[in-house]
Structure formats: structure tokens, C-alpha cells
Amino acid sequence: MKNILLYGFLAVMSFGFAAFRTADNTKNATSIAMPDLVIDEIIVKCAAQRWLVFYVKNQGDALSIATLVRIRPTGGDDPTQQCLNQCVRNVPSLLPGKNFKLRVPFKVVGQCDCTGSMTIEMLVDHNNYVEETDETNNEEFYTQ
């Protein structure tokens, strides 16, 4: 009699745990929090300080991992070619809503006229290290 009660109790418990595990492991895919990195607020400083200044912002709802941003001049004979070399800069992990300020120096040469027309491409997470909610908003062009 004890064995029947024991087996009955174990059967009820295993059924209860199986139902609990199934309900607990089911997650809504749309509720997963993810980061979303974008380029924000681009400034060209061309007086005493000769810098390209911009921010990388995490506008998502989760912490991002550290990544890279690629900066490069675009356009063939554009004066940007004489002012800026293509470069890659580190971006640390960012909390949701936070940003990171980056400064890239312009070349100090006679041909660099950073007051003229310039076209610069900035691409955050260019190797797609960070899984984001929107992978299409990582690129920004600055044209002056």
C-alpha cells in the first residue's frame, strides 16, 4: 500500500514540475531587452582646436558590450581627404540612455581646410559585434 501511495505521489509531483518548467521556460521574444547604438551630435571644431567631435549613444534598453566605431573621409577630391585619415576608435560598454564622447584630431597640414566642404562617414559597430534592436541605424554621414 505504501508503494502505491509513493508512486502516486511521485507521479503527481513529476506532472506538476513538468507543467511548471514548461510555463517557466516560455518567453515572449519581443520582451528581450537589447542595446541600440547610434552616432549623435556631430561637431567640427576648426579654430584653435582642430577636432571632429561626436557622441556614440545607446538608445536601447539594455547594456551594450564594448565595440568599435570607424571614421573615414568620403568623396574623391573632397578637402576631407587632406584633413582626416580613416581610423577606428574604441567605444566602451554603455548603459541604456548613456553616451560616450569621441574626439578625432584633424591633420595639421597646409592642405587641411576644415572650414570648407567636408564629407565624413561614421559607422558604429561596423563589424556587428553588438546584437541590437535596430542594425540599420549605425551609420551616419556628416556633410558640411
Image: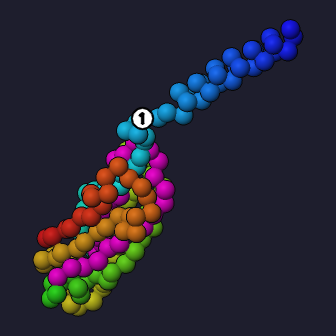
Residue 4 shown in magenta: no
Task: Decide if residue 43 is in sight here.
Answer: no
* Up/down of 47 relative to 111, above or below: above
Q: Residue at x 75, y 19 (%)?
A: 10
Residue located farthest toward the top when viewing the structure as drawn: 1
* Up/down of 92 relative to 107, above or below: above
Q: Quadrant of the C terminus?
A: bottom left
Q: Nearer the viewer, residue 75 or 1?
A: 1
Q: Nearer the viewer, residue 62 or 28?
A: 28
Q: Nearer the viewer, residue 26 or 13?
A: 13
Residue 50 shown in magenta: yes
Residue ID for mark 1: 28
Instruction: Tell me the amino acid under the disc marked 1.
Output: Asn
Q: Which residues are magenta?
A: 49-75
Q: Residue at x 40, y 69 (%)?
A: 127
Residue 95: image location, x then y, percent: 45, 47
Residue located farthest toward the right when viewing the structure as drawn: 2
Q: Quadrant of the N terminus?
A: top right
Q: Is residue 2 left or right of residue 127?
A: right
Element type at mark 1: loop
Residue 89: image location, x then y, percent: 42, 71
Q: Residue at x 55, y 30 (%)?
A: 22
